[in-house]
Image: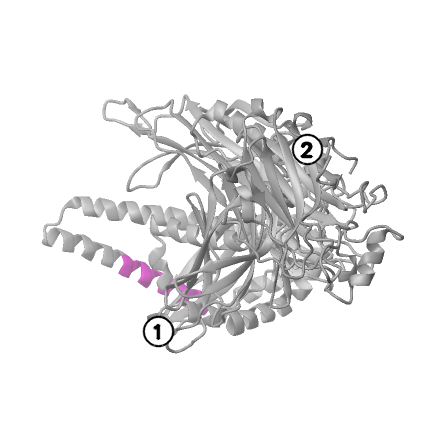
Amino acid sequence: MSSAAKDKEKGDSPGRKSADEDTMLVKVVTEYFKLAGATLFVWFFGYFQFSPSWLLLGLVVYSWKAKHNKDKKWKIKIAQEIARDEREAILARVEELPSWVYFPDVERAEWVNKIIDQLWPYIGDYVKKLLIESIEPQIRASLPDSLKSFKFSKIDLGDIPPRVGGVKVYTNLVRRDEVYMDLEITYSSDADVAVKVKGINAGIKDLHIHGTLRVIFKPLISKMPLIGGISVFFLNSPNIDFNLTSLANAFDVPGLNDMLHKIVSNQVASMMVLPNRISIQMADGVNLNKLRYPQPQGVLRISLVEAKDLIKADISITGKGKSDPYATASVGALTFQTKVIDNTVNPLWNQTFEAIIDAADGQMLDLFVLDKDPGNKDDKLGDVQIEISQVKEKGLLDDWLQLENIKKGFIHTRLQWLYLANDPLELDRIMQQIQEENKDDESISSCILLVNLDSARDLPRGKKTLSEPSPMVKLCVGRDKQESTAKANTNEPRWEENFRFLVHNPNYQNMEIEVWDSKSNKLLGSATIKLKDLLVATDMVLDQQFQIRNVVTTGQVHMRLALRVLTPELNPEWMDKEEFIDPPPENQGSPVDKPPEGTSVDQNNSQKSNNQESDKPAATSTSPASTMSSSTAATTQGGEDMLIPSANKEVSSEVRQRKPQTSNVEYAGQYDRGRIQMTFRYSVQRQRLIIVIHQCVNLLPLDSNNLSDPYVRMYLLPDKSSGSKRKTQVVKDNLNPVFDETFEYSVNPTELSSRTLEIMVKNQTGVFSSSEKVMGVVSLDLATLDTTKAITEWFDLQPEVGAQKVSMVESDV
C-alpha cells in the first residue's frame, strides 16, 4: 500500500474523525460566546446611553489589532519556514531571498548553520543557566523593593536556531593584523520566555531579529590561539518583532505596542549596536580597553536643510490640506530629530547634527520625513538611506535626494565627513572657518574629547559609620552630560569606561567632574578641567590623576583625556597608531631618557644612581584646572608616578609625536653648561605664545653635595616686570631635571617680531648652596619663530655674561 493511501486510511480512522469533530465543536462554541459577548457589549452601551463614538473607537482598535496580528503572524511564519527549509521557502517566495543571492561578494555559510544547529540545544542550556544565575539577580537588585519577586518563570529558546544568510569577509582597506567579517543574521525563533512578578505572568514568544552583525578578529598574534580579541556588534539597529503572552497582551494596542517595541529595540541598541559592542579578550597581554573603545574613524556632520513637494498628510474637509513635517536621522544607535514645521509641504529646517562614526564601511544613514500628529502615530512622508562610506570617500555630499516608499517628495541634505587630527594648529584654522560660516552656532563642533575613566582612590567614607560609598561619576561638557555605572561598596572603584564628547571651542570650554555616592546621593567631590590644557599637552593627551575636592577631604580620579580636532582634510601624520598589545615595562621609555652609549650623561646617571631614584622630579602635581603657569608638573605619591605626558615618554611637540634626535645631540652643550629642551607654538586665533619647558640635561653641580636644585625663569623682553615673569617648579638634587610645564604669553602678532624671550636656568640657593645662582641662559629671537607650526628644539645654555641671541630654527627631529 502506498504512503498516500496509508495517510488517507489513517486520516479516515474513527479516532481521527472523533478528534476533528471535538475540535470543530469547541471552535463553534468559542465563536458563539464571542458573538454573544459582543452583542451584550453593544446592549450595555445602549442601555446606559453612552456615546456611539466609543463603539467606533473600539471597532477601530479591534480592526487594527486584528490586522496587525495577522501581518505579524504571516511574517513570522515565512521567516520560520525559511529557517526550517531555506530552499523550499525561497522557491515559494522569491522576494525573501538572502543577501548571497544578490551580492556576489557575499558567500553562503551552510556549514556554519549546520554547526549552529548542532550546538543549539547546548546553547539553549547555557543561556537558560546564564539568565537564571546571573541576569535574574542583577535585574532583581536593580528593581525597587515592591518588585523584588521578579523571576524567570519560563525559558525556552525553541528548536529553531539563528541562521547566517550570508558572509562577507573584508580583505581590502584593513590592516594585516585584523579580519573583518559581516554576517547576515536571521533569528526567527519559536522561543517562549516568561517572567513572573508578584504572581503576575508576562512574556514574549516568536522573537524575530534580522540584521547585519560585524565580527572583528583583532589583533592577530603569532601564538595560539592566533586571535588576540573578538569584537561583535550590529552596524545598524536590527529589525525586531515579537508576540506578547499572558498579561503582556495588554500592551498589544496602538501606542503601547509601539512604545514596548521601542523599549526593546533601545535595550538591544545599548548593548550591541554601534558605538556599543561586545568585546572578548582571547589572549594575555591584549589591551581589552582598546577592543572595547577604539578611537572613532571620524565624525559625520549631518545638515538637514529643507524638503519640498511632500505629500499632504492632513486633508481637510474642503479637500485641501498640508502636513506638519519633521525629519529624523539615524546612525547606529543614535537618532536626531529636527523641529516640526506646521502647515507646509516645503519645510525649511536648516538644522545640523553630528554623529561619531566607528565604522564607516557598512554603516548606513537613515533619513525619515514624518508628519507630526499629536495623540496619534506620525504619518510617514518618505525615507532615504545613504551609505556613510560614500560620504567618507567624497568628503562632502550636498544634494537633493528623492524620498522613497512614497509617491513624491525630496529632501535637501548636506553631509560632510570629518577626520580626527592631533594638531592644535589645525584647530586655529577650523575655528576661524566655523566662525566665518556659522557665526555663533554652537551645534557645530571643532573637536572631539575622548575620556577614559579608569579608577579613583582615597574617596571619603561615611562620617559616622565609616561605611564604604558606592561611587559613580558624572561628566559634563557644555550641555552634554554622561554618567558612569556605580561601583558598590568601595572607596577605590575601577570603572574602566569610556565617554565621548563633541566640543564647540576647547579654548574656553571645561569638563566638569562630579563623584557621587549612589547609595546616599551625596557629592563625594568635584573638579574642573580646562580643555585648553590639552592643546599644549603632548599629542593633546593627558593621562594622570585628577584631584577632586569637597569641603573636607580630597580624592583622586585617574583618567586619560585625548582631544582631537575635526577636520575635512586627511593627513597621515594625524592618524593614531593602535597598540593592542601592552608593551613590556622595559620597552616603555624614551630615547631621550637613554642617551647614546658613551655620552657623559650615561656616566653621570650611573654615578648618581646610588643617590637618587633615576632623577625623578619631586615637584607637587598640579591639576589642569589650575593656572597655565603652574600646570603639568610631575608627581610621585604613594609610590606611584602620576605623570602627564612628559619627556619620560617620546618627546614631541603638542602637534604630533616626533622621534627625538639622540645621535646628534651633544649633551654637555657648546659651553659645557648643559642643554634645555623646549617647545614653542604661536596661536594666531588666541594671539598667545605657548612655551613648554620639557627638561634640562647635564647641568652644572653648584651645591656641596655635587648636585643642584634647578628651576627655569623666563621674561618676554623688553618687559621685565612681574607680569612678564614665568617660573617653573624647583627640582631638588638633580642635574637632569624634568619639568614639563606649560606657560603662555599674550602677545599681538605684529609685536611678536620685536620681542625676545629670555630663558634662565637658575639654582635655588640655600644654606649649603654656592653663591652662584645662574646655571645658564638662552636668549631667543622671536622674529625667527615660524608661526605656522610648533617647534621642539634643544638649546645650549650660555654664560650669563655675553649671552648671544639664538634664532628659532626647527630641528630635524
Compare residues 574 and 14 and report the one nearer the observer.
574
Name the amino acid type tagged 2: Leu
**236 horizontally vs 109: left or right:** left
Residue position marked by numbered label 1 in the rendering: 199
Q: Is residue 798 magenta?
A: no
Residue located 85% across and 52% down the image:
600
Q: Secondary structure at mark 2?
A: strand
Labels 2 & 1 near each other (Cβ < 8 A)? no
Magenta residue check for 24: yes
- Element class at badge 1: loop
Q: CA distance from mark 2 to mark 1?
A: 81 Å
Badge 1 amino acid: Gly
| Snapshot quadrant of residue 713 | top right
Is 148 displayed left or right of 284 in the figure?
left
x, y percentage for residue 504?
48, 36
- Would you place residue 253 above or below residue 142 in this image? above
Q: Earlier in the sequence, mark 2 or mark 1?
A: 1
- Image coordinates of residue 118 in percent, x first then y, are 68, 65
The range drawn in magenta is 17-34
Q: Which mark is residue 147?
A: none
Q: Which residue is mark 2?
A: 780
Residue 329 to residue 741: above or below: above
Q: Residue furthest right?
A: 598
Q: Is residue 76 above or below residue 434?
A: below
Quadrant position of the C terminus in the picture: top right
